[in-house]
Image (cartoon, coloured by chain):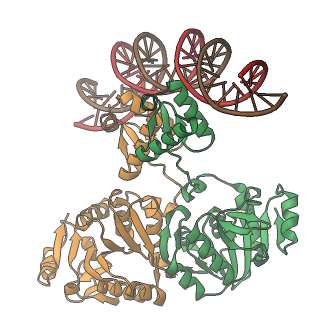
Chain colours: A green, B orange, C brown, D red
Amino acid sequence: MLLAERQSLILKELNDKGRVYAADLAQQLGVSEDTVRRDLNRLGEMQLLRRVHGGALPLQLDVPDYADRLELKHPDKQKRANAALSYLQTGQTILLDSGETCLYLAKALPRDMRLTVVTACPLIACELMHHDKADVIVVGGSFFKPALRSVGAVTCNMLRKMRFDIYFTGACALHPERGFTAKYMEEAEVMRISVEQSDKTVVMGGPDRLGLIANHQVANVRELDILITDQSADPAVLQALRERNLHIVQV
Amino acid sequence: MLLAERQSLILKELNDKGRVYAADLAQQLGVSEDTVRRDLNRLGEMQLLRRVHGGALPLQLDVPDYADRLELKHPDKQKRANAALSYLQTGQTILLDSGETCLYLAKALPRDMRLTVVTACPLIACELMHHDKADVIVVGGSFFKPALRSVGAVTCNMLRKMRFDIYFTGACALHPERGFTAKYMEEAEVMRISVEQSDKTVVMGGPDRLGLIANHQVANVRELDILITDQSADPAVLQALRERNLHIVQV
DNA sequence: GTAAAATCGGCAATAACATGCAAAAACAGG
DNA sequence: CCTGTTTTTGCATGTTATTGCCGATTTTAC
């Protein structure tokens, strides 16, 4: 049996059974356990499975979902949110995305400023419960748990019926050429409409998100207006973004 | 069984049931309690669960204090919510009102029951974030802070497009002759439509709400189906309600 | 308070592992 | 075809990880 053939069989077995044991594979494939271990290690290095003591498990793409993001306290996100506040004016209608940075922004909204705040994130709506001066509008739809927000056709239809002065969003991935991209298709669609329906789009994103490309297109850089990021952001990327008419603020 | 596989199963069990016992896991997984304890301790170190004496609990994410504030303050509301669970069946589409009792109900929804849960209350939507088996639909609209829910024309339109197997609601005021009434006009309108769009309406309300009349009509007693209340409820009022075909459960 | 349950630490048996080595096979170039 | 190299494989070695058990201790429930 060929090496590659054997490794394919291992992957197939893993896919079928949901787990494989080194000892079983050795017997099943008629090779020594050492050989199986070598195969498993290589497949692990190639990110084709998760190597564990005694065998291997399928890769589980641990999506950094909202819950995880919430656990970490990020003073830098707080800073970016505070910086974003300076674009606000009394009486405006703003659209707040989901995400931790936007949650910080919601928390930081001046309590004495009259605003209309629209959001598809229930957590942000709850956060604004005690903001007396803010009219809050909840955008409904299918609740998408990984992003903690409404998505889908109902959400899109409701957004299309509105206009916003500013759309605040956290950056999933922002690349000079490939533009603003998001991880999930449904989320990307809602964000695309959000950009379209807003006079101005303010993106808040750490240096780690700049230069990244995610799977689903939201907007190109020229459709965005302001990026709020850190001092540590890569100057080359920033320059490339500036050349595409994006105003950049570093805090 | 692989160590990592076992730990995954523990996390899955924890996610499904909302808590795990070391002794149960040992038997279930066919390993000694020592091994289970070691697994639990490691998972605890990895911040994947909260280790407690006798087992483990899910991580308490910093879901806003609104929810925590309500915790365990009203054991009677908890009881009524638990009683309401018995009317649930797998696969149903239910409408959850806002209110503390409904929040208890949301917390108590079986983690392994497939459901479609519709709600106009963002707090309840957030609460269901970790309920993997539940499809959650958020009803949008103007956010009405006193009731912590969406109201208004958008909310009503969205509800009118749906049908529900059961509508669970807390009683604002329930009177044998004047029926089910609510304090706020906009809220009452949404609740009226909720009753109309549902095959069955389950009202959970303490004895203090029975016999009361609020300003805005929601439904008459014959439009309701089940009342879940306490032993201490006034027998005369209950009898009057029964005569109007309301099924009454006392917990 | 007391008894039961759960926990902790150490210990030993076993399984799984990494490493080096050598034989065999496949390969490359002349 | 031959020779030197690389790859693959199995084996032997020592090392590490996992697990169950035991006794001492802590926590919990009554």
Question: Where the C terminus of chain B falls, by quadrant?
Answer: bottom left
Answer whether residue A139 is visible to the viewer in this image: no
Q: Which residue is drawn at 63% across and 42% down?
A: A46
Q: In which quarter of the image is residue B160?
A: bottom left
Question: Where the N terminus of chain B falls, by quadrant?
Answer: top left
Residue sitting nearer the eye, A41 or B155: A41
Drawn side of residue B161 relative to residue A136, left or right = left
- Considering only vertical position in the picture, is B66 above or below B220? above
Q: How many numbered marks does the figure carry?
A: 0
Drawn side of residue A175 relative to residue B116, left or right = right
Give the percent coordinates (x, y) of residue B237. Answer: 16, 79
Give the percent coordinates (x, y) of residue A195. Answer: 68, 79
Answer whether residue A52 is visible to the viewer in this image: yes
Q: Quadrant of residue B169?
A: bottom left
Give the percent coordinates (x, y) of residue D20. Answer: 35, 22
Give the percent coordinates (x, y) of residue B134. Answer: 39, 64
Drawn side of residue A215 relative to residue B69, left or right = right
- Considering only vertical position in the picture, is A106 above or below A138? above
Q: Which residue is drawn at 54% across and 84% down?
A: A158
Residue sitting nearer the eye, B148 or A163: A163
- Considering only vertical position in the picture, is A149 above or below A206? below
Drawn side of residue B89 relative to residue D24, left or right = left
Q: In which quarter of the image is residue B242?
A: bottom left
